[in-house]
Protein backbone atom coordinates (compact mmCIF):
# COMPACT_ATOMS: atom_id res chain seq x y z
CA UNK A 1 0.00 0.00 0.00
CA UNK A 2 1.30 3.46 -0.92
CA UNK A 3 1.39 5.84 2.00
CA UNK A 4 2.47 9.48 2.30
CA UNK A 5 4.55 11.29 4.92
CA UNK A 6 1.64 13.62 5.78
CA UNK A 7 0.56 13.67 9.43
CA UNK A 8 -2.25 15.60 11.18
CA UNK A 9 -1.61 19.33 11.68
CA UNK A 10 -3.37 19.11 15.06
CA UNK A 11 -3.20 16.72 17.98
CA UNK A 12 -6.77 15.38 18.23
CA UNK A 13 -8.56 13.25 20.82
CA UNK A 14 -9.08 9.79 19.36
CA UNK A 15 -6.38 10.38 16.72
CA UNK A 16 -5.56 7.17 14.87
CA UNK A 17 -1.83 7.47 14.25
CA UNK A 18 -1.10 4.56 16.62
CA UNK A 19 -3.51 2.33 14.73
CA UNK A 20 -2.60 3.07 11.14
CA UNK A 21 -0.86 -0.24 10.38
CA UNK A 22 -3.94 -2.10 11.64
CA UNK A 23 -6.17 0.02 9.42
CA UNK A 24 -3.98 -0.31 6.30
CA UNK A 25 -4.08 -4.09 6.31
CA UNK A 26 -7.89 -3.97 6.49
CA UNK A 27 -8.52 -1.46 3.70
CA UNK A 28 -10.49 -2.78 0.71
CA UNK A 29 -8.27 -3.61 -2.30
CA UNK A 30 -10.14 -1.13 -4.49
CA UNK A 31 -12.77 1.54 -4.02
CA UNK A 32 -14.13 4.57 -5.82
CA UNK A 33 -14.78 7.60 -3.60
CA UNK A 34 -13.29 7.74 -0.08
CA UNK A 35 -15.36 9.18 2.81
CA UNK A 36 -14.35 10.14 6.34
CA UNK A 37 -17.41 11.68 8.04
CA UNK A 38 -15.65 12.07 11.45
CA UNK A 39 -12.30 13.28 10.17
CA UNK A 40 -10.82 14.93 13.31
CA UNK A 41 -7.06 15.20 12.76
CA UNK A 42 -7.40 13.00 9.67
CA UNK A 43 -4.55 10.57 10.39
CA UNK A 44 -5.81 7.94 7.93
CA UNK A 45 -6.90 10.14 5.04
CA UNK A 46 -3.67 12.16 5.16
CA UNK A 47 -1.48 9.10 5.26
CA UNK A 48 -3.26 7.55 2.26
CA UNK A 49 -4.13 10.72 0.30
CA UNK A 50 -6.84 8.93 -1.71
CA UNK A 51 -8.17 10.57 -4.84
CA UNK A 52 -11.76 11.82 -4.69
CA UNK A 53 -11.85 12.04 -0.91
CA UNK A 54 -14.73 13.58 1.05
CA UNK A 55 -13.86 14.67 4.58
CA UNK A 56 -16.32 15.97 7.12
CA UNK A 57 -16.54 16.93 10.78
CA UNK A 58 -19.20 18.64 12.88
CA UNK A 59 -16.59 20.86 14.55
CA UNK A 60 -16.93 24.13 12.66
CA UNK A 61 -13.60 25.59 13.79
CA UNK A 62 -11.70 22.46 12.77
CA UNK A 63 -13.35 22.39 9.34
CA UNK A 64 -12.71 26.11 8.91
CA UNK A 65 -9.01 25.43 9.59
CA UNK A 66 -8.90 22.69 6.93
CA UNK A 67 -10.42 25.04 4.34
CA UNK A 68 -8.09 27.91 5.29
CA UNK A 69 -5.04 25.64 4.98
CA UNK A 70 -6.29 24.72 1.52
CA UNK A 71 -7.18 28.26 0.38
CA UNK A 72 -4.91 30.68 2.28
CA UNK A 73 -1.80 28.76 3.20
CA UNK A 74 0.66 31.66 2.90
CA UNK A 75 -1.29 33.87 5.28
CA UNK A 76 -1.57 31.02 7.81
CA UNK A 77 2.18 30.33 7.64
CA UNK A 78 2.98 34.01 8.07
CA UNK A 79 0.77 34.28 11.16
CA UNK A 80 2.12 31.08 12.72
CA UNK A 81 5.72 32.16 12.15
CA UNK A 82 4.94 35.48 13.80
CA UNK A 83 3.35 33.70 16.80
CA UNK A 84 6.20 31.19 17.13
CA UNK A 85 8.76 34.00 17.37
CA UNK A 86 7.26 34.98 20.73
CA UNK A 87 8.02 32.96 23.88
CA UNK A 88 4.75 31.39 24.89
CA UNK A 89 4.38 32.58 28.47
CA UNK A 90 1.22 32.00 30.48
CA UNK A 91 0.13 35.56 29.75
CA UNK A 92 0.72 35.23 26.02
CA UNK A 93 -1.20 31.94 25.81
CA UNK A 94 -4.22 33.39 27.59
CA UNK A 95 -4.08 36.52 25.41
CA UNK A 96 -4.15 34.35 22.27
CA UNK A 97 -6.97 32.28 23.72
CA UNK A 98 -8.98 35.48 24.33
CA UNK A 99 -8.32 36.69 20.76
CA UNK A 100 -9.51 33.32 19.44
CA UNK A 101 -12.64 33.41 21.59
CA UNK A 102 -13.49 36.95 20.47
CA UNK A 103 -13.40 35.73 16.89
CA UNK A 104 -15.41 32.64 17.70
CA UNK A 105 -18.11 34.54 19.54
CA UNK A 106 -18.36 37.24 16.86
CA UNK A 107 -18.33 34.60 14.07
CA UNK A 108 -15.22 36.10 12.46
CA UNK A 109 -14.11 32.95 10.73
CA UNK A 110 -11.00 34.33 9.03
CA UNK A 111 -7.46 33.14 8.32
CA UNK A 112 -6.14 34.50 11.61
CA UNK A 113 -8.70 32.44 13.47
CA UNK A 114 -7.46 29.28 11.72
CA UNK A 115 -3.85 30.12 12.65
CA UNK A 116 -4.90 30.69 16.26
CA UNK A 117 -6.75 27.35 16.24
CA UNK A 118 -3.51 25.56 15.29
CA UNK A 119 -1.44 27.63 17.73
CA UNK A 120 -3.77 26.92 20.68
CA UNK A 121 -3.89 23.23 19.81
CA UNK A 122 -0.10 23.04 20.12
CA UNK A 123 0.09 25.12 23.29
CA UNK A 124 -2.91 23.88 25.25
CA UNK A 125 -3.11 21.01 27.70
CA UNK A 126 -2.95 17.66 25.87
CA UNK A 127 -4.16 19.10 22.55
CA UNK A 128 -7.73 19.02 23.81
CA UNK A 129 -10.56 20.93 22.16
CA UNK A 130 -13.25 21.86 24.65
CA UNK A 131 -15.65 24.80 24.83
CA UNK A 132 -17.78 25.95 27.77
CA UNK A 133 -21.53 26.58 27.69
CA UNK A 134 -20.89 30.14 26.44
CA UNK A 135 -19.01 28.66 23.50
CA UNK A 136 -15.56 29.77 24.69
CA UNK A 137 -12.54 27.54 24.18
CA UNK A 138 -11.38 26.94 27.76
CA UNK A 139 -8.46 24.51 27.72
CA UNK A 140 -5.54 25.67 29.92
CA UNK A 141 -1.96 26.27 28.83
CA UNK A 142 0.36 23.22 28.56
CA UNK A 143 3.16 25.21 30.25
CA UNK A 144 5.53 24.72 27.32
CA UNK A 145 7.20 27.93 26.25
CA UNK A 146 8.68 26.86 22.95
CA UNK A 147 6.68 24.42 20.90
CA UNK A 148 6.63 24.71 17.13
CA UNK A 149 3.08 25.22 15.90
CA UNK A 150 3.68 23.55 12.56
CA UNK A 151 5.97 21.55 10.36
CA UNK A 152 6.29 23.68 7.24
CA UNK A 153 6.75 20.81 4.74
CA UNK A 154 3.87 18.86 6.23
CA UNK A 155 1.39 21.72 6.17
CA UNK A 156 2.37 22.62 2.59
CA UNK A 157 1.79 19.03 1.48
CA UNK A 158 -1.58 18.98 3.26
CA UNK A 159 -2.59 22.23 1.57
CA UNK A 160 -1.72 20.85 -1.86
CA UNK A 161 -3.57 17.60 -1.20
CA UNK A 162 -6.71 19.33 0.14
CA UNK A 163 -7.17 21.15 -3.18
CA UNK A 164 -8.71 17.97 -4.58
CA UNK A 165 -10.71 17.07 -1.47
CA UNK A 166 -14.37 17.86 -0.72
CA UNK A 167 -14.55 19.34 2.78
CA UNK A 168 -17.87 19.66 4.62
CA UNK A 169 -19.14 20.53 8.08
CA UNK A 170 -22.34 18.65 8.79
CA UNK A 171 -23.76 15.72 10.66
CA UNK A 172 -22.26 12.35 9.64
CA UNK A 173 -25.51 11.11 8.17
CA UNK A 174 -25.88 14.07 5.81
CA UNK A 175 -22.23 13.75 4.84
CA UNK A 176 -22.94 10.33 3.33
CA UNK A 177 -26.12 10.94 1.34
CA UNK A 178 -24.17 10.65 -1.95
CA UNK A 179 -22.18 7.51 -1.06
CA UNK A 180 -22.65 4.82 -3.71
CA UNK A 181 -21.91 1.13 -4.24
CA UNK A 182 -18.15 0.69 -4.62
CA UNK A 183 -17.28 3.67 -2.39
CA UNK A 184 -15.42 3.31 0.91
CA UNK A 185 -16.27 4.90 4.29
CA UNK A 186 -14.07 4.98 7.38
CA UNK A 187 -16.11 5.82 10.51
CA UNK A 188 -14.21 7.01 13.56
CA UNK A 189 -16.91 8.54 15.74
CA UNK A 190 -16.37 9.70 19.33
CA UNK A 191 -15.92 6.62 21.49
CA UNK A 192 -18.66 4.74 23.30
CA UNK A 193 -17.61 4.94 26.97
CA UNK A 194 -15.99 1.84 28.44
CA UNK A 195 -18.21 2.34 31.46
CA UNK A 196 -21.84 2.78 30.28
CA UNK A 197 -22.70 4.98 33.26
CA UNK A 198 -20.28 7.63 31.94
CA UNK A 199 -22.50 8.29 28.91
CA UNK A 200 -23.41 11.53 30.66
CA UNK A 201 -20.08 13.14 29.86
CA UNK A 202 -20.56 12.17 26.22
CA UNK A 203 -23.95 13.86 26.09
CA UNK A 204 -22.22 17.20 26.54
CA UNK A 205 -20.15 16.52 23.45
CA UNK A 206 -23.29 15.43 21.64
CA UNK A 207 -22.51 11.77 21.05
CA UNK A 208 -25.03 9.83 23.08
CA UNK A 209 -26.03 6.18 22.98
CA UNK A 210 -28.78 7.27 20.57
CA UNK A 211 -26.12 8.65 18.21
CA UNK A 212 -24.27 5.33 18.30
CA UNK A 213 -27.54 3.57 17.40
CA UNK A 214 -28.14 6.03 14.55
CA UNK A 215 -24.60 5.39 13.29
CA UNK A 216 -25.08 1.60 13.40
CA UNK A 217 -28.35 1.92 11.46
CA UNK A 218 -26.52 3.96 8.81
CA UNK A 219 -23.75 1.32 8.68
CA UNK A 220 -26.41 -1.30 7.90
CA UNK A 221 -28.07 0.85 5.23
CA UNK A 222 -24.74 1.51 3.52
CA UNK A 223 -23.98 -2.21 3.63
CA UNK A 224 -27.24 -2.91 1.77
CA UNK A 225 -26.25 -0.29 -0.80
CA UNK A 226 -22.89 -2.00 -1.45
CA UNK A 227 -20.68 0.64 0.20
CA UNK A 228 -17.56 -0.79 1.91
CA UNK A 229 -17.46 0.39 5.54
CA UNK A 230 -14.80 0.19 8.25
CA UNK A 231 -15.44 1.51 11.77
CA UNK A 232 -13.36 1.82 14.93
CA UNK A 233 -14.58 2.08 18.50
CA UNK A 234 -14.10 0.75 22.01
CA UNK A 235 -14.84 -2.89 22.59
CA UNK A 236 -17.99 -2.50 24.68
CA UNK A 237 -21.19 -4.49 25.03
CA UNK A 238 -23.14 -1.78 23.24
CA UNK A 239 -20.79 -1.80 20.24
CA UNK A 240 -20.79 -5.62 20.08
CA UNK A 241 -24.60 -5.57 20.13
CA UNK A 242 -24.97 -2.82 17.51
CA UNK A 243 -22.63 -4.46 14.99
CA UNK A 244 -23.61 -8.09 15.52
CA UNK A 245 -23.22 -10.05 12.29
CA UNK A 246 -20.35 -7.88 10.93
CA UNK A 247 -16.67 -8.74 11.09
CA UNK A 248 -15.44 -7.48 14.50
CA UNK A 249 -11.72 -7.69 15.34
CA UNK A 250 -10.20 -6.71 18.68
CA UNK A 251 -7.01 -4.64 18.64
CA UNK A 252 -4.62 -3.46 21.36
CA UNK A 253 -3.78 0.22 20.94
CA UNK A 254 -1.64 2.81 22.66
CA UNK A 255 -3.54 6.02 23.36
CA UNK A 256 -1.69 9.31 23.25
CA UNK A 257 -4.28 11.63 24.85
CA UNK A 258 -4.89 10.57 28.41
CA UNK A 259 -3.38 12.29 31.41
CA UNK A 260 -3.27 8.97 33.28
CA UNK A 261 -0.54 6.80 31.69
CA UNK A 262 -2.23 3.63 33.00
CA UNK A 263 -5.25 4.34 30.83
CA UNK A 264 -3.25 4.82 27.65
CA UNK A 265 -3.56 1.21 26.54
CA UNK A 266 -6.96 0.02 25.56
CA UNK A 267 -8.88 -2.62 23.69
CA UNK A 268 -10.55 -1.31 20.60
CA UNK A 269 -12.37 -2.95 17.73
CA UNK A 270 -12.18 -2.59 13.98
CA UNK A 271 -15.49 -3.50 12.37
CA UNK A 272 -15.98 -4.16 8.67
CA UNK A 273 -18.75 -5.15 6.30
CA UNK A 274 -16.28 -6.73 3.83
CA UNK A 275 -13.15 -8.88 3.78
CA UNK A 276 -11.91 -11.58 6.10
CA UNK A 277 -10.37 -11.61 9.56
CA UNK A 278 -6.62 -10.99 9.59
CA UNK A 279 -4.79 -14.07 10.82
CA UNK A 280 -2.41 -13.36 13.72
CA UNK A 281 1.25 -13.64 12.71
CA UNK A 282 2.80 -16.92 13.82
CA UNK A 283 5.72 -16.46 16.19
CA UNK A 284 8.73 -18.45 15.00
CA UNK A 285 10.85 -19.85 17.76
CA UNK A 286 14.58 -19.13 17.62
CA UNK A 287 16.59 -22.31 17.32
C1 LIG B 1 -12.54 10.18 17.35
S1 LIG B 1 -12.60 11.75 16.56
C2 LIG B 1 -11.89 11.38 15.01
C3 LIG B 1 -10.39 11.17 15.10
C4 LIG B 1 -9.70 11.06 13.75
N1 LIG B 1 -9.92 9.79 13.11
C5 LIG B 1 -8.21 11.33 13.86
O1 LIG B 1 -7.38 10.53 13.39
O2 LIG B 1 -7.86 12.38 14.43
C6 LIG B 1 -14.28 12.00 16.29
C7 LIG B 1 -14.69 13.26 15.53
O3 LIG B 1 -16.11 13.22 15.31
C8 LIG B 1 -16.62 14.55 15.29
N2 LIG B 1 -18.08 14.47 15.48
C9 LIG B 1 -18.78 14.33 16.64
N3 LIG B 1 -20.12 14.25 16.39
C10 LIG B 1 -20.27 14.31 15.04
C11 LIG B 1 -21.39 14.25 14.16
N4 LIG B 1 -22.64 14.11 14.62
N5 LIG B 1 -21.17 14.33 12.83
C12 LIG B 1 -19.92 14.49 12.34
N6 LIG B 1 -18.80 14.56 13.12
C13 LIG B 1 -18.97 14.45 14.46
C14 LIG B 1 -15.84 15.24 16.40
O4 LIG B 1 -15.82 16.64 16.20
C15 LIG B 1 -14.45 14.58 16.27
O5 LIG B 1 -13.56 15.37 15.52
Image (spheres, rainbow, N blue to C red):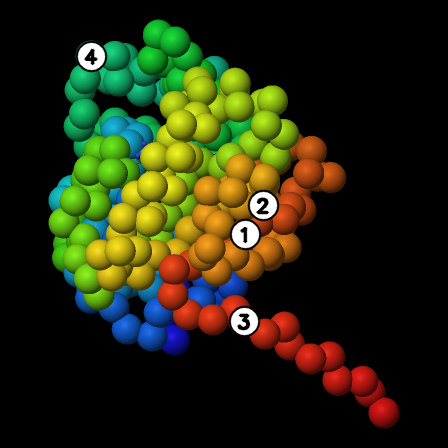
Question: In the drawing, what numbered circle is on residue 132?
Answer: none
Q: Which residue is mark 2?
A: 235
Residue 198 point in image, percent of width and height: 58, 23
Which mark is on residue 278? 3
Callout 4: 10 Å neighbours few (<14), some, many (20+)? few
* Label 3 CA crowd tier, 10 Å (few <14, some 14–19, many 20+): few
Task: Specify which label sits upstream in the sequence, 1 or 2.
Answer: 2
Say whether disc 3 or disc 4 marks the residue closer to the N-terminus. Answer: 4
Of tags 3 and 4, which is closer to the observer?
A: 3
- Across and down, in percent, residue 37 comes to 29, 44
Give the residue at mark 1: 269
Question: What is the spatial separation of the Cα atoms under label 3 and label 4, in whole angstroms?
Answer: 50 Å
- The residue at the point 80 percent across, 85 percent down is 285
Give the SS element for disc 1.
Answer: strand
Disc 4 designates what residue? 106
The answer to whether residue 207 is above or below residue 134 is below
Q: Nearer the viewer, residue 114 or 184?
A: 184
Amino acid sequence: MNTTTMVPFVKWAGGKRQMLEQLYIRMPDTYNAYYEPFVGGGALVLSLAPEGAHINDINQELVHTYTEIRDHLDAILEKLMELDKVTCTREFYYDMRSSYNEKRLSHSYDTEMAALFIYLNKHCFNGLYRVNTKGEFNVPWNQKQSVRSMDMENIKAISAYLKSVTITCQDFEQALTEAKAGDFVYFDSPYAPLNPTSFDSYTKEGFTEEEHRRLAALFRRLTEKGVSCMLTNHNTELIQELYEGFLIEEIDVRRAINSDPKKRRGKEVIIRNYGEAIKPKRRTRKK
